[in-house]
Amino acid sequence: MRVDIISIFPEYFTPLDVSLIGKARHRGILDIRLHQLRDWTDDVHRTVDDTPYGGGPGMVMKPEPWGAAIDSVIGPASPPPRLVVPTPSGRPFTQELALEYAKEPWLLFAPARYEGIDARVMAEYGSRLRVDEVSIGDYVLAGGEAAVLVIVEAVGRLLPGVLGNAGSVVDDSFAPGAMAGLLEGPVYTKPPVWRGHEVPPILLSGNHGAIARWRRDEALRRTVAKRPELAARLDREALDKRDREVLDDASFRFTPEDMAD
Ligand code: 6GU
């Protein structure tokens, strides 16, 4: 997969040299290219922002440098990349969207600083390529760069050959499968007792059926405790008798609204 990132802080992306993503780049699975937005300005101050029309606080990123930068990066290539614009006012970035991005041959990220990019840039490219304005959560960052790091890591680990253990992708809390829609429960390794804390004995039993059941119980309990809105969305047809007992024991009740759908 090719990934281009246009930013006024290309040095922000040095973490992409490290660990899983760094290795994927080294192996040629990920081709990440960084670009300095200011290289597409033509004034001495290399200006990328200006005051907002209509007034208000902060500054807005000018459309001309973005237009020149994006045109230059995409060139005459077809098909063009999918353009991802991180913004707190975008649609939520989810595991589902990460899986979709992992199938793309080419992504282009346009992270903004200040109050965002002049909206005409998204309008212009919206008619030429797929443009997604994406948010990584309900909080406000100082710029989209950290969001790009998050998205590239979430997508990069899904690319074929990036993860050592293929099983770790399917066990993800938000991946489809047997534990679909549940948070993962606690995990343990050696030693069997640490500072007086024991590993749950079931995990040492060798009884794989009982272990799978225990893990599902823990996942159900944790989901009710930490993400009740996820528990409310569980497919009730897919719950067995024991699941219902565990949910009951965790005092979880499907609300009348959940019962309607
Ligand atoms: Cl993608 N950008 C910024 N600046 N803040 C955010 C965000 C993105 N997602 C959540 N907060």
Image (cartoon, helix red, strand yellow):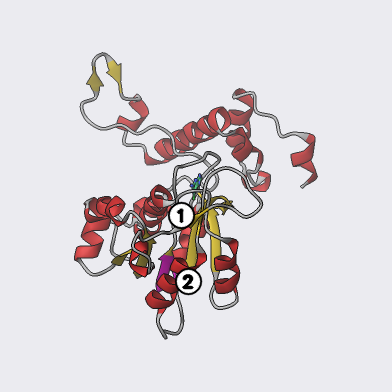
Foreground residue among 40 and 255 = 40
Say how many tags the image has: 2
Q: Name which quarter of the figure residue 201 lies in.
A: top left
In the rendered structure, which amino acid carries the disc numbered 1? Ala
Residue furthest to the front: 44
Image quadrant assignment for residue 207: top left
Residue sitting at the far top: 196
Q: Is residue 97 above or below residue 174?
A: below
Quickly name the residue at label 1: 112
Q: Label 2 sits on what residue type? A: Gly
Q: Nearer the viewer, residue 123 or 228?
A: 123
**Visible in this render: residue 102?**
no
Residue pictured at 65% horizontal, 43% vertical: 233
- Determine crowd level at label 2: few under 14, some 14-19, many 20+ residues with C-alpha closer than 10 A: some
Read off the magenta span.
103-108
Quarter in which the N terminus is drawn: bottom left
* Separation of residues labelled 2 and 1 (CA atoms): 13 Å
Q: Residue at x 30, y 20 (%)?
A: 198
Q: Is residue 222 left or right of residue 211?
A: right
The yes-or-no answer for disc 2 within 8 Å of ligand 1 is no
Q: Secondary structure at mark 2?
A: helix
* Residue at disc 1, CB closer than 8 Å to ligand 1: yes
Residue that numbered label 2 is attached to: 67
| Residue at the image position 74 percent from the left and 40 percent from the top | 258
Q: Position of residue 130 (x, y in %)?
A: 54, 71
Evaluate whether residue 247 shows in this view.
Answer: yes
- Report x, y in % for residue 220: 54, 34
Of the image marks 2 and 1, the number of the one nearer the N terminus: 2
Element marked by disc 1? loop
Residue 46 spot, x, y in % from top left: 36, 61
